[in-house]
Image: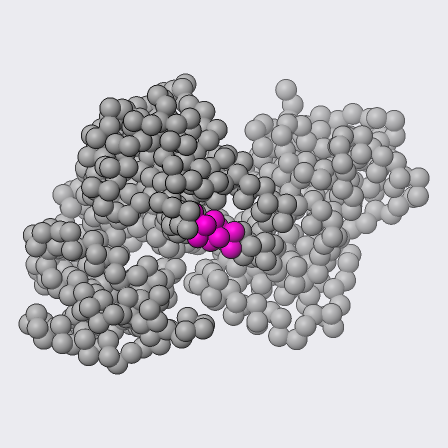
Amino acid sequence: MSTVNYELIGDIGVIRLNNPPVNALSHGLREGIWGAIKSAQEDASEALILLCEGRTFIAGADITEFGKPPQAPMLSEVITEIENSHKPVIAAIHGTALGGGFEVALACHYRCALKSAKVGLPEVKLGLLPGAGGTQRTPRLAGVSAALELITSGNPISAAKAESMKLIDRVISDDLLKGALAFARELINRKAPVRRVRDIHIDPASIPEGLFDEFRQRLNKRARGQLAPQHIVTCIEAATQLPFDKGLAKELDLFIECLLSDQSAALRHMFFAERSATKIKGLAKDTPTREINSVGIIGGGTMGGGIAMNFANANIPVKLVEINQAAIDRSLAVIDKNYSISMKKGKLSEAQKTRSLSLITGTADYAELADVDLVIEAVFESMELKQDVFARLDQICKPGAILATNTSYQDIDQIAAVTNRPEDIIGLHFFSPANVMKLLEVVRGSKSTDTVIATAMQLAKTIKKVPVLAGNCYGFIGNRMLRPYAREAQLCLLEGATPEQIDTVMQSWGMAMGPIAVGDLAGLDIGYKARQGLSKAEKGDSKTYCIADALVEMGRLGQKTGAGYYRYDSETRARSNDPEVLAVIKAQAEAHGVERREIPDEEILNRLIFALINEGARILEDGIAQRPSDIDVVYAYGYGFPPHRGGPMYYADRIGLKKVYDTICTFRDLHGEAYWAPSPLLARLAQEGRTFANWVDDQS
């Protein structure tokens, strides 16, 4: 079947595109559109409609063609053919019109869309910018400020929003073809002109003074170190200063620069990594799953309440179990407050908030969980407490119910051992705040069945999470790697760095937050309490926690007490350095016989990042992660690792495993083998001149 078909309906030509599953702009589709527009110039049609079959309008470029030799006609040539048509061309949009697909629509002379449709230019999420006129046409229709927000965020908008921004001319309620034909008939009857967006002039006087500089500064905070967002601003600025064709040339130059950049390569890696993470090795595609129509959650604290919101947002009823009515009321009040914050940000309507809240009910009676399909335990990190919870659930919950723990590091099998259904036990490790963070570590126990695993992975999609399967070990993937990362931060403090230096180095490199500030945000008492339950041997070298312990014992627990490694303003939470902390650090260094020195920024960066990589390699050796890219997904979505660096394992490949290995050997010689013994896998790959990526290819 041809990807492009053409028919005349009266005097209106309808060009139908059909390139399943998402009508991506493949070479065949581009060629078909170009030919149909060209030939329609000579027939009896008075207007043309561009319409897509299937579930969506053109959803974007064919990403599988990235890196391959280009084939004519290029997208820009197709767009020129559409724009130069002497008959009005109307884009009829349903589903999503994204990236190059929306650029095609912008080249049309008019646009209509179903009210359920969404449009957008998400290229920035792949480290790119719209390369076929998106940065030049969007500000001409929507205005400069709106274009800056739309294109640098990359987020799609509804048809109604697009109409209000003048990106869509008509929103259609039901039948798209019928509505598009009626719209075309109106245009023909009133002899509407061929309206080319390129001909719209942007009045420089309409642009607020300093707008572009101000927006660049905002991006320096929101998209620190990223190339594409800043280039997008430059392109939109060019649309206000240059003739259209010169603006297009500028856009194309910067698009190519982005396309060839390390950042775009890393973000494209993350795009595919996220999709690979959902594929479970050895799990048959036809593995049955269980329906999850109701959920129970044990513990209504910050984590439990956030988890409840995920299910309510997906229209799944939740029973939230707390110890008494007062605790239930507190939990529901916090959930209500969180929804109100989202409303104020325009992320949901009052009706959506009301509906979601109606799906969350509190109870102090475990017996009310007898018929739920899934229970998630989210209590304090105590094995004894968790085992008590699961023993009770085992007696109450119906056969076939999945029992999950939200533990961050406890042994899943030990928890499952107190039940008579270990095959139905699994880890579902959410990340805080659970209603915001996208990552979900799905932790398989030794007896977790394929059905339970498949159900958990499918459920993640239902609640809009990015799932990664992890094996059962202390800390799983993310927190196991976090230990050496945090260890090196503590040792750098002891050896001569300041909290501010460490955080600045890591944030400047691209981490969402530095490790010291993260400790203050999470609360220093959490780690302190966890260490109290460990033996001296389990705690390890006191150098790795002595500073944190000293601060906790001084009552400095972090942001919640107004003081931790930093001091915090009681109203704004703005942080400032505190000489008292520097004195504590120096005293601990002296007590442990550590001679302090000036530590170069590069050493701090390498010690923290290479510690992650080395532990990641061990995780691969142990079979805890299925593939290196799964580790990258965990760190990008759960721990603030900069996606434009591609995750720790991709970053290691990019800079070369030999360099990583040699540096780790240097650290081993300087700081001891206890912390810096190179992973055998890393050592072997480095010596063979290979990468983690081609190692995993060998395992497939």
Residue at 27%, 70% (x, y): give it.
556
Q: Position of residue 356 (x, y in %)?
A: 55, 42
Q: The C terminus appears in which quarter of the rendering?
A: top left
Q: Quadrant of residue 624?
A: top left
Question: Residue 19 versus residue 176: which sits nearer the camera?
Answer: 176
Q: Which residues are magenta?
A: 328-337
Q: Position of residue 43 (x, y in %)?
A: 85, 30
Residue 469 visible here: no
User: Is 647 colored magenta in this rendering?
Assistant: no
Residue at 15%, 51% (x, y): give it.
533
| Residue 63 vertical position relative to residue 510 in the rendered view, above or below | above
Question: Residue 200 versus residue 286: which sits nearer the camera?
Answer: 286
In the displayed structure image, the side of residue 103 where residue 441 appears, left or right: left
* Residue closest to the far bottom: 579
Q: The N terminus appears in which quarter of the rendering?
A: top right
Question: Residue 394 versus residue 623: which sits nearer the camera?
Answer: 394
